[in-house]
Amino acid sequence: MAVRRPTLRRAVMPSTGYGHNGGMTDSPAPLADPHLVFDPVAGTRDVVVLGSTGSIGTQAIDLVLRNPDRFRVTGLSAAGGRVGLLAEQAYRLRVRTVAVAREDAVPALKEALRGQYGTEPLPEILAGPDAATQLAATACHTVLNGITGSIGLAPTLAALEAGRTLALANKESLIVGGPLVKALAEPGQIIPVDSEHAALFQALASGTRADVRKLVVTASGGPFRGRTKVELANVTPEDALAHPTWAMGPVITVNSATLVNKGLEVIEAHLLYDIPFDRIEVVVHPQSYVHSMVEFTDGSTLAQATPPDMRGPIAIGLGWPERVPDAAPAFDWTKASTWEFFPLDNEAFPSVGLARHVGQLAGTAPAVFNAANEECVDAFLKGALPFNAVMETVTRVVEEHGTPGTGTSLTVADVLEAETWARARARELTKNTPTTSTERTTAEARA
Ligand SMILES: NC(=O)c1ccc[n+]([C@@H]2O[C@H](COP(=O)([O-])OP(=O)(O)OC[C@H]3O[C@@H](n4cnc5c(N)ncnc54)[C@H](OP(=O)(O)O)[C@@H]3O)[C@@H](O)[C@H]2O)c1
């Protein structure tokens, strides 16, 4: 199969610059740059959707179905938990290939596909842990990575290596494999889909890199905004899953409650835009109208705002540099609304500080942070770990991991090894953590 090589259509503004008044000068080529367009295509864009049955995936498919003149989905991938939905999507979109990570899901998938296709020929089926990675390298214009978790790293690398434009929702792959992604990605090849980073992308388009003073990442504050650490002690998975402004998958929703998601996003912003951590601020904005902001050296701040709806950022990821009309609803300015901003409570939510720390350590530290967190979130959702113990456990695993020695020479094997260790250590610590307040009091008394 021919590998599509990058062609830069235009670079109308310099991505480097001569700093003045505190502007950015240190990076020759940020990973994501709105001034560059990678691999332009006239007419319909072929898109592969990884994680098609999830929150990002289903919203992407809604957007594609409403814009058949712009996008055509050629491949879908999922874990294999929702084969009925996957088969329905495959038939509606008439895709070439369907991929599932779980091989044991193939019989049920075939049956569900047969139910949709009747006597028509079925699409090609890829199955197994590498199925999404294989699919990511197939012929298409854009790969949307909407898989949850660091399992998305191999598909991210495969899409970049094959020369596809990568619409990146799966922030974990960038966070755990930052140097690997940087080594493979061509300028302009990655378009961020996370709403905050899509907002920064759009705001950054209005100035040169030299004029950027800082990035301001907004956080809704999640369902527990305003609570103290003591008040968070007994919150339940149901409480954590009730996000006030966004409907998302369970992992990112719990990560929004702990604010780990915001910590991951600070690392993501640093890696995408090559802005130092001390120039990335977090501000709590409960309404989730402003998705992030860029402060320029002249004191001007540009904010990107829409009602919270991921189809807006997904449309940026799939359609850039064009905007997709009516991708998501706009504001109704005839109705009164209040937009509030608050400083972050770092004591109740230590996750953002810890994320900055691992981001600065680099190497395998972000992978350890993320893997330990994924294990702890799983334990929390199963009722096996109290809410505050999620961050306590992650902090302990990060501390035990210490300062990584790999730096920028990180390999995939380093990442996998660090993740395996962090998951095992987090599971071990989780097993020994008392789950109820009575158990905790008893354990503290014994100590
Ligand atoms: N949801 C949002 O609004 C939002 C916003 C910003 C960023 N993001 C990011 O986008 C990513 C997806 O989030 P989400 O909320 O859409 O998650 P989700 O609703 O839990 O969906 C996850 C998707 O990934 C699939 N999947 C899981 N493991 C897989 C594997 N090994 N191979 C292939 N597919 C696999 C799942 O398939 P099954 O259905 O078969 O399990 C499902 O389709 C995350 O990185 C998240 O941080 C999400």
Image (cartoon, rainbow, N blue to C red):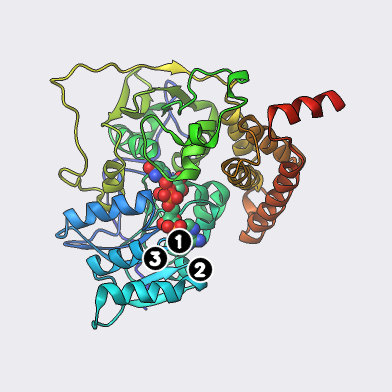
Secondary structure at numbered mark 3 = helix
Secondary structure at numbered mark 2 = loop
Compare residues 18 and 104 and report the one nearer the observer. 104
Q: Earlier in the sequence, mark 2 or mark 3?
A: 3
Q: In the rendered structure, are the residues bearing label 1 and label 2 in contact, judged by CB atoms less than 8 Å apart?
A: yes
Which image quadrant: the N terminus?
bottom left
Furthest residue in direction right, as rendered: 446
Residue at 32% across / 68% down in the picture? 87
Q: Which residue is mark 2?
A: 102
Tell me the crowding category of disc 2: few under 14, some 14 to 19, or many 20 or more residues within 10 angstroms, Cα based. some
Q: Position of residue 336 (x, y in %)?
A: 20, 16
Secondary structure at numbered mark 1 = loop
Residue at 33% across / 35% down in the picture? 199
The answer to whether residue 327 is above or below residue 141 is above
Q: Earlier in the sequence, mark 1 or mark 2?
A: 1
Tell me the crowding category of disc 3: few under 14, some 14 to 19, or many 20 or more residues within 10 angstroms, Cα based. many
Q: In the rendered structure, are the residues bearing label 3 and label 1 in contact, judged by CB atoms less than 8 Å apart?
A: yes
The answer to whether residue 289 is above or below residue 120 is above
